[in-house]
Amino acid sequence: MKDFKNTGKMAHHDALGDRIQIGKAYGWARNDNGLTQVTIGIAEKFTEKGVTLKVISSKKGLYEYDPEPLPIGGKSIDAVKEKVNVKGMILFPLPEPKVKIDFTVRGNNNGFAHLDD
C-alpha cells in the first residue's frame, strides 16, 4: 500500500474508527437546510486526503417528502459523480448483503442497484 506521509492516521478510518476496507460498501449522508442526500459507494483506493469510492446509489429528499433517486454520472444538474473522494470519518460500513447485488445498469435504474433472485 502507498505510504501517505502527510495523512493523519484517521484519514483512512471510518466513522466507527475501523480501518476502511477496499472493496467494501460504505454509506454517508449530507444535510443542508433540510435537503438530505444519502449515498452508497464501494471503497476503491486510498488518497492523501481520504478514500475514493465508486458510487452505486444516491438519493435526495427534502424534509418529509419521499426521497428521489439521483442519476450517477452524466450531465444532469442533479447527477452524482461516478467516483468521489471523501474523508474516511464520514463513512459508515454497510453490512454484507444476504442476497447478490447486481450493479450493472439496466434501462433507467436512476442509480439504484437491482437485487437478483
Image (cartoon, grey):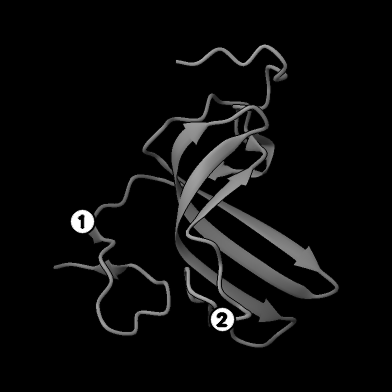
Q: Does residue 8 appear in the picture of this structure?
A: yes
For image coordinates 47% across by 33% down, the residue present is 45
Q: Position of residue 84 (x, y in %)?
A: 56, 51
**Residue 83: percent from the left, percent from the top?**
50, 53
Mark 1 crowdedness (10 Å alpha carbons): few <14, some 14-19, many ≥20: few
Q: Residues within 10 Å of mark 2 (few under 14, many from 20)?
A: few
Q: Which residue is labeled 2 in the image?
A: 76
Q: How many marks?
A: 2
Q: Visible in this render: residue 93? A: no
Q: Secondary structure at mark 2?
A: loop
Tag 2: amino acid = Ser
Q: Residue 81 has which mark?
A: none
Identity of the residue drawn at 61% across and 53% down = 28
Find residue 56 and report its image quarter.
Answer: bottom left
Residue 3 falls in image quadrant:
top right
Nearer to the camera, 27 or 70: 70
Q: Residue furthest right?
A: 33
Residue at x 34%, y 67% (from the top left corner): 113
In the shown orientation, is residue 70 left or right of residue 77? Answer: left
Instruction: Give the mark nearer the N terminus: 2 vs 1.
Output: 2
Name the residue that disc number 1 marks. 100
Q: Is residue 41 above or below residue 113?
A: above
Residue 70 spot, x, y in % from top left: 53, 76
Instruction: Name the quarter where the N terminus is drawn.
Output: top left
Q: CA distance from mark 2 to mark 1?
A: 29 Å
Relative to 96, say whether 49 is above or below.
Answer: above
